[in-house]
Structure formats: C-alpha cells, structure tokens
Image (cartoon, rainbow, N blue to C red):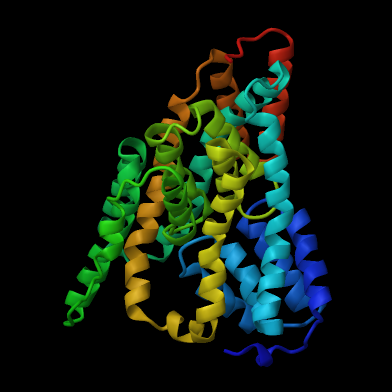
Amino acid sequence: MRPTESLAEPSLGEIAREWGRIGCIGFGGPPAHIALFRKLCVTQREWLADDQFERAIAATNLLPGPASTQLAIYCAWRLRGPKGALIGGLGFILPGLVLILALSVLFLAGSPPVWIRGAGMGAGAAVVPVAIRAGLGVAVPIWRRTPDARRPRILLYALAGAIAAATTGPWLVLVLLACGAIELTWQRQLAGGGVSVHVWPLLATVAEPGGTSALVWTALKVGALAFGGGFVIVPLMQSDAVGTYHWMTHAQFLNAVALGQVTPGPLTQTVAAVGYAAGGFPAALLAAFVAFLPSFSFILFGAARFERLLLNERVTAFLAGAAPAAAGAIIGSAIPLAEALSETWQYIVLGAAAVALLALRRSIVLTLLAAGTVGAVAGLVGAPIPH
C-alpha cells in the first residue's frame, strides 16, 4: 500500500489541525479514537475508502504498542507520506501529553493540598475495576474467535499473564514473549514446518539497567513490547516504577494511571508521568520520546509492507499466544493495584466504581472523575489522607 492510493490528498495544515483536534477530544481510549478517525477520514472527508481503513486497523492491531496511535500515524502516512505521518502523529499525541505533564506537577508534587491527595486516592481506587474491564475487553473477543481446540491453550496463556502481573512484575515481558513463542512453535509444528525464534528479546528482558537507562528500558517496554491493548502497559510499568526503582509510591502510581485515563489521547502517555516522578520534566520528555518512537518507526519504515504483515502466519501465530497472555496480565494487574489502597473509604469507592463500570457499563472517564471528586470531598471533610 502506498500513500498515493488514498482517494484525496489533504494539506499538511489540514492534517495538523484535524489530528490535533482529535488529540484534544479523544477521550475514551482506542474505541473512541478509531471512531473519530473513521468519521474524519472515511465518512466526512472521504480521504480513505472503508476497506483501506479496515486494513489499517487490522495491521496496527498486529503491532506491539499503542494501536490507536499507530492508526493515527498510519492514516496520515497514507494521505501525505512521511511528513504527514510525523505531523499527524505529533498532533494526536501532544495535546494529551501536555495535559498529563501539567497534571503530574499538580498530583505528584512533594506536598500537594489535601483535596488533591484525596482526589488522587479516590480516582486511584477506581483504577482497579478499570483494569478488569480493560482486560475483559481484550479477552472476550479473543475467546469468541478462538476455535474450541485452541481454547485450553488460550486459558493457560491468560493464566500465565495474570500470575506474572500479580506476582512477578519484572518478568512479565518475558512471559508475554514466551507465550507468543510457544504458540508460534505449536502452530508451526502442527503445520509440519520448522520454527526460528530469535532469543534476543527474551534475553533483553532479564537485563537490570539503572539510572537513565532504567527509565529508557521501562519506556521501551511500553512502546515496543506491549501486546494486546493499551492497558497492558500498567503491569509493565508498575514493577519498575514502584518496586524496582522506587520512582513512585503505590498511591502515586495509581494517580498516574488515573491521569492517563482522564486525559485525551493514548494511555501510553502515562509513561510521561512515571518519567516526571523519576526525574522531572527532562525525564518525562525522554520517557515519552522512547515510548512513542517505535510507533513512528513501525509506520515510517514498515507501512508499505502492511499487506504482507496481515498475511504473515508467523506474526499471527505469535500474537495468538501473546495477546491472551496480555489480556490475563491486564486483569492480573488489578491485584497489586488493589493492594496499593490504604484506607477503608477507598474500598467503598472501588466497590461503587466496579458496579458503575462492570455492571452498568458507564463511561470510564466519568467514573474516574466522579471517584476523584468523592476523594477530594473526603479529604476536605477530614477522611484519612496519608501524606
């Protein structure tokens, strides 16, 4: 596929304006982002045909990292080539990134006001059912499209991911890659062919860098090794940010995840809040750059080969193992997130949020804002708010 195949050609200024607009109003995660880009590129402006857009969704879903960000970059690439990809991608990412950095200063400062701490604790409590809902959102479609004969393996991959996220955070990437490699090997053996698995990604996961390299590695995992949906970055980051390098407390990490949910754009920008806690604005910008660099690289250097990617049996076999493990990891991340809660009133907020999100299917953004409001009020009326 080439950029010249698009039905029309907007100016670079139009791409900057329209992609920036979606970056400002893109609350609600990948489903909302996809709907907004479909409305813009297919329905309203007819820049892309419907089948072109569907193939773009399918191809970006095969890539690790933030799929909706890659879709935004890819659509701009189809319309105006590499310049369009850079302008469109930055337009989509920067509004939410600027906002989450501003909120990080407010919520992650050394001694924020009590109502701010309460708002963070309230929203953080609601993150637990958000994780469960996000994991189920990935897991249910995988289960439905999986043939009966493969379902026992899918359950084992999901269980492995959940256990790794709940108990052995630093090894989660290794588990995701191993599940993909096992499924790839299984399917290749059934087909009567051999299999070649590169071990360098597996070896990389056991490295324990320190200092700036630690932050770069954490951000790289988020941008280049996250399979199966945006929320899988939460367990990938949590063990590094809280347990290994102590950049944040458990409560601050919950705040960062909540900020990533209530700001527009991709959840991947949460890594900027982690970077801010690790080393201020320079570290935040470095973390964001490293996390989003793979998405731009995949499109700029590989978009012309996306049609072949859709037909690559090894890629689809690998994802058939890695994706259910990622879904399990997202659900499993709810356990350490819940363990980070410290006050009784937070569990009440958690229960109410679980009803709103899992039973009533209310908006994630509105639920988190409501939970944050409850927390702010709790702080103002004297509820326990640790420093």
Residue lying at 51% horizontally and 34% vertically, measured from the top left? 128
Q: What residue is shown at x 33% (from left), y 51% (from top)?
A: 158
Give the quarter of the image for residue 275. Answer: top right
Foreground residue among 366 and 359:
366
Residue 349 in view: yes
At horizontal 66% and vertical 75% (from top left) the residue drawn is 85
Q: Which quarter shows the N terminus?
A: bottom right
Along the line of sight, which residue is nearer the eye, 343 or 98? 98
Q: Does the image show residue 49? A: no
Q: Is residue 152 left or right of residue 117?
A: left
Question: Toward which corner of the image does residue 91 lie, by quadrant?
Answer: bottom right
Q: Nearer the viewer, residue 194 or 220?
A: 220
Going by the image, does 163 lie left or right of 117? Answer: left
Residue 374 placement (x, y as % from top left): 70, 22
Which residue is at 40% across, 38% downward? 239
Q: Residue furthest top?
A: 382
310 left or right, relative to 94: left
- Name the quarter where the C terminus is drawn: top right
Q: Is residue 102 left or right of residue 55?
A: right
* Residue 100 in the image, given as x and y percentages of width and height: 68, 44
- The image shows residue 70 at horizontal and vertical percentages of 58, 68
Number of numbered markers: 0
Pinpoint residue 52: horizontal percent, then vertical percent: 62, 83
